[in-house]
Image (cartoon, helix red, strand yellow):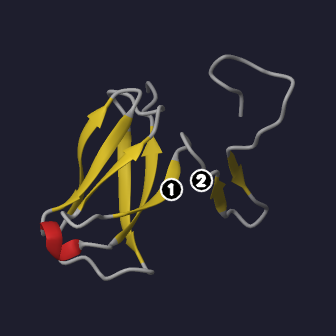
Amino acid sequence: LTPLAGPINGHRQAFLVDSEGVLHGRETANCFAGLAALDATGTVVVANARVTATTKFNLTAQDGGPPPTGVIYQSTRVVGTSFTIKSAAGAADTGVQVYYQLWEPTAP
Protein backbone atom coordinates (compact mmCIF):
# COMPACT_ATOMS: atom_id res chain seq x y z
CA LEU A 1 0.00 0.00 0.00
CA THR A 2 1.15 3.52 -0.72
CA PRO A 3 0.04 6.52 1.35
CA LEU A 4 -2.18 9.08 -0.38
CA ALA A 5 0.71 11.55 -0.18
CA GLY A 6 2.99 9.10 -2.02
CA PRO A 7 5.81 6.80 -0.95
CA ILE A 8 7.73 7.62 2.20
CA ASN A 9 10.91 6.28 3.76
CA GLY A 10 9.16 4.67 6.72
CA HIS A 11 7.15 1.46 6.99
CA ARG A 12 3.83 1.43 8.83
CA GLN A 13 1.63 -1.43 7.78
CA ALA A 14 -2.08 -0.58 7.88
CA PHE A 15 -3.57 -3.56 6.05
CA LEU A 16 -2.41 -7.11 5.39
CA VAL A 17 -3.75 -10.24 3.75
CA ASP A 18 -1.78 -13.18 5.13
CA SER A 19 -0.85 -16.40 3.31
CA GLU A 20 -4.11 -18.01 4.50
CA GLY A 21 -6.22 -15.17 3.04
CA VAL A 22 -7.07 -13.68 6.45
CA LEU A 23 -7.46 -9.88 6.50
CA HIS A 24 -5.62 -7.90 9.18
CA GLY A 25 -6.10 -4.17 9.75
CA ARG A 26 -4.54 -1.62 12.08
CA GLU A 27 -6.89 -0.59 14.88
CA THR A 28 -5.37 2.60 16.24
CA ALA A 29 -6.45 6.24 16.26
CA ASN A 30 -7.50 7.47 12.82
CA CYS A 31 -7.32 4.03 11.23
CA PHE A 32 -10.03 2.23 9.33
CA ALA A 33 -11.19 -0.12 12.10
CA GLY A 34 -11.81 -0.24 15.83
CA LEU A 35 -14.08 -1.08 18.74
CA ALA A 36 -16.44 1.29 20.54
CA ALA A 37 -18.96 0.83 23.37
CA LEU A 38 -22.39 2.48 23.38
CA ASP A 39 -22.94 4.85 26.31
CA ALA A 40 -25.98 5.25 28.60
CA THR A 41 -27.99 6.77 25.74
CA GLY A 42 -27.10 4.01 23.25
CA THR A 43 -24.72 6.33 21.39
CA VAL A 44 -20.97 6.69 20.89
CA VAL A 45 -19.00 9.38 19.07
CA VAL A 46 -15.84 7.96 17.50
CA ALA A 47 -13.07 10.48 16.82
CA ASN A 48 -11.47 9.75 13.45
CA ALA A 49 -9.82 12.36 11.23
CA ARG A 50 -10.08 10.07 8.18
CA VAL A 51 -13.88 10.31 7.87
CA THR A 52 -14.93 11.84 4.54
CA ALA A 53 -18.26 12.77 3.00
CA THR A 54 -18.27 9.44 1.11
CA THR A 55 -16.97 7.06 3.80
CA LYS A 56 -18.98 3.82 4.09
CA PHE A 57 -19.38 2.14 7.49
CA ASN A 58 -19.57 -1.55 8.46
CA LEU A 59 -20.86 -2.05 12.02
CA THR A 60 -21.03 -5.35 13.89
CA ALA A 61 -22.04 -6.06 17.51
CA GLN A 62 -19.28 -7.95 19.33
CA ASP A 63 -19.05 -10.13 22.41
CA GLY A 64 -17.76 -8.52 25.61
CA GLY A 65 -20.97 -6.61 26.27
CA PRO A 66 -24.70 -7.22 26.25
CA PRO A 67 -26.33 -8.27 22.98
CA PRO A 68 -28.06 -5.42 21.13
CA THR A 69 -31.83 -5.16 21.28
CA GLY A 70 -32.09 -2.49 18.60
CA VAL A 71 -30.63 -1.84 15.16
CA ILE A 72 -27.13 -0.34 15.34
CA TYR A 73 -26.40 2.31 12.72
CA GLN A 74 -24.07 5.18 11.82
CA SER A 75 -26.14 8.31 12.37
CA THR A 76 -23.94 11.35 11.70
CA ARG A 77 -20.47 12.29 10.56
CA VAL A 78 -18.28 15.37 10.84
CA VAL A 79 -15.86 15.25 7.93
CA GLY A 80 -12.26 15.10 9.12
CA THR A 81 -13.32 14.79 12.78
CA SER A 82 -15.69 11.99 13.86
CA PHE A 83 -18.75 9.84 13.28
CA THR A 84 -21.58 8.74 15.56
CA ILE A 85 -22.89 5.21 16.11
CA LYS A 86 -26.39 4.81 17.59
CA SER A 87 -28.80 2.09 18.55
CA ALA A 88 -32.49 2.40 17.70
CA ALA A 89 -33.16 0.97 21.18
CA GLY A 90 -31.38 3.89 22.88
CA ALA A 91 -30.51 3.33 26.55
CA ALA A 92 -31.58 -0.33 26.34
CA ASP A 93 -28.33 -0.98 24.44
CA THR A 94 -25.96 0.61 26.97
CA GLY A 95 -22.59 -1.15 26.93
CA VAL A 96 -23.04 -2.91 23.58
CA GLN A 97 -19.62 -3.36 21.94
CA VAL A 98 -19.56 -2.30 18.28
CA TYR A 99 -16.75 -3.11 15.85
CA TYR A 100 -16.53 -0.64 12.97
CA GLN A 101 -14.75 -0.58 9.63
CA LEU A 102 -14.48 2.46 7.39
CA TRP A 103 -14.29 2.07 3.62
CA GLU A 104 -13.73 4.59 0.87
CA PRO A 105 -15.39 3.97 -2.49
CA THR A 106 -13.24 4.01 -5.61
CA ALA A 107 -14.17 5.06 -9.09
CA PRO A 108 -15.20 2.15 -11.34
Which three-letter amino acid code belongs to the residue tagged 1?
Gly
Report whether 32 appears left or right of 94. Answer: right
Q: Which residue is mark 2?
A: 27
- Asked if 62 appears above or below 31 in the picture, the reply is below
Q: Quadrant of residue 20?
A: bottom right
Q: Secondary structure at mark 2?
A: loop
Tell me, yes or no, whether the two marked residues, 1 and 2, touch with CB atoms within 8 Å.
yes
Q: Which residue is mark 1?
A: 34
In the rendering, at what x and y percent does residue 23 appear?
Answer: 64, 59
Crowding at mark 2 (Cα within 10 Å: few <14, some 14-19, many 20+): some
Can you name the residue that lies furthest to the left here?
Answer: 89
Which three-letter amino acid code belongs to the residue tagged 2?
Glu
In the rendering, at what x and y percent does residue 69 appear?
Answer: 18, 78
Crowding at mark 1 (Cα within 10 Å: few <14, some 14-19, many 20+): some
Q: From where the camera sits, is residue 28 visible? A: yes
In the rendering, at what x and y percent does residue 77 appear?
Answer: 28, 36
Q: Please report the residue visible at 22 percent of the width from the left and 67 percent of the height from the top.
A: 40
